[in-house]
Amino acid sequence: MGGRVIGFDPGKKSKKGDHSFAYSINDGSGNLLDSDYIETTLDTVTVEELESYRNEMFCLLEWMNIQDDDTIIIERFIPRPGRGMGSSAEYINLMISGLVYTLVDMGVAKDKIILVTASVWKTRFKKEFKGKLPPEIYPKVNGLDKHQADAFGMTAYVLLRREDLAKRQKEKDDKKLAREEKKLKQQKEKSRNSKK
C-alpha cells in the first residue's frame, strides 16, 4: 500500500539550537526506524548559510535512500498573530522551501511530498488517539522529544490517511458492485417476464 513515511517538523527552538528540523522515519507499518535533527540550523539568512543547510539536507536525504514508494510529509509553518514569530517564520519557511526543492531535485515525485498544516494532521491524530497528541504518547514509548514526536505523529497521520482512502475506495467499489448486481438482477427479471 505504500513504503516508508518520513516526517519533518520545523521548529523555532530545539535541542539542536534555533530553527531546526526534527525528522522521524516510519517503516510504513507504524514502527519507528530513526528520529533525529538536521544538524545545520539557520541563524541568519545568507547565501552561505542557505548553501550549508541545503548541502546537509542533500546528504541526509541521500542517507535516507528515498524510494519511489516512500512518502514525505512536512509541516507547514504558519505564524500565529501576536506570537512574535516574524524572523522565525522567514527562517523556517526558507528551510521548508529548501527541503522541498532538494527533494524535487533528487527526483522525488511531487505527489509523494505532502505539505500539511499542524491543525489538519493533529485533528485527525487526536480523533484516532482519544484526544492525545504525539508528545503525550511517543516520548513514553520511544524517548522522543516534542519535535521528534510531532514528526513521527505526522507519519501516523499519513498511515491513517491511507487507511481512510482505502476504506472510502472499498465503500465506493462495494456500492458500484451492488448497483451492477441490482442491474443484472433487473435484466434477468425483465428477460423472464418477456418470455412469459
Image (spheres, rainbow, N blue to C red):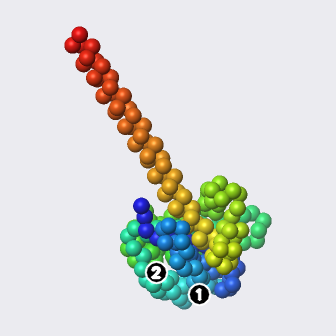
Which residue is most to the right? 82
Q: Label 2, label 1: how many angstroms apart (C-alpha)?
A: 15 Å
Q: Which mark is residue 39?
A: 1
Q: Is residue 137 visible?
A: yes
**Closer to viewer: mark 2 or mark 1:** 2
| Number of numbered discs | 2
Q: Residues within 10 Å of mark 1 (few under 14, many from 20)?
A: some
What residue is shown at x 54% (from left), y 72% (from top)? 31
Whether 93 is drawn above or below 179: the answer is: below
Instruction: Residue 73: give x, y in percent of width and height.
Output: 53, 67
Mark 2 sits on what residue? 64
Quadrant into which the N terminus falls: bottom left
What residue is shown at x 48% (from left), y 49% (from top)? 167
What residue is shown at x 65% (from left), y 74% (from top)? 141
Q: Is residue 90 visible?
A: no
- Secondary element at tag 2: helix
Q: Residues within 10 Å of mark 2 (few under 14, many from 20)?
A: few
Classify residue 183 by image quadrant: top left
Circle 1: residue type: Glu
Instruction: Residue 155: give x, y in percent of width and height.
Output: 55, 67
